[in-house]
Amino acid sequence: MSCYLRHISDVLGEAGIEVTPANRKQIDQAIHQMVDVHYKDCPTAWKKLKQDVLTNDDKRRHLVAHVREALSG
């Protein structure tokens, strides 16, 4: 699993999104895009997630919606 996805699996799981080997790259890319961090810069993406997204209910909902959209097509 990507470096930080294991830490947010509860957030995604509450929304009915299961992180699997088949979809983890799509989820990871969507999250990097959402927090405006170049793909594969996991430490920076995780830092932004912790500071900006996971502490704000509206941004958490936006994260879930963004990941769902990325997975749907």
Image (tube, rainbow, N blue to C red):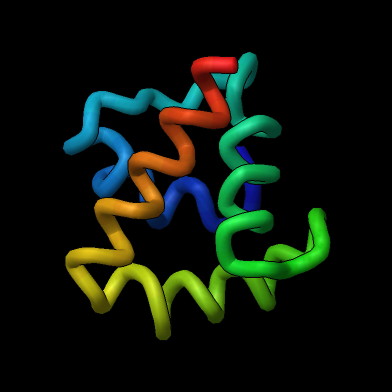
Task: Please state if 61 lies on the left or on the right of 19 as rendered.
Answer: left
Q: How many marks?
A: 0
Percent coordinates x, y for residue 65 in the rendering: 36, 40
Q: Residue at x 58, y 67 (%)?
A: 35
Q: Residue at x 32, y 40 (%)?
A: 12
Percent coordinates x, y for residue 50 in the rendering: 41, 76
The quadrant of the picture occupied by the C terminus is top right
Percent coordinates x, y for residue 60 in the rendering: 29, 59
**In the rendered image, the vertical position of residue 22 relative to residue 16, given as above or below:** above
Which picture quadrant has residue 21?
Answer: top right
**In the rendered image, the vertical position of residue 39 relative to residue 12, given as above or below:** below
**In the rendered image, the vertical position of residue 5 relative to residue 4, given as above or below:** above
The quadrant of the picture occupied by the N terminus is top right
Relative to the observer, which residue lies in front, 19 or 69? 69
Q: Residue at x 66, y 57 (%)?
A: 32
Task: Please state if 39 lies on the left or on the right of 4 as rendered.
Answer: right
Q: Residue at x 69, y 33 (%)?
A: 25
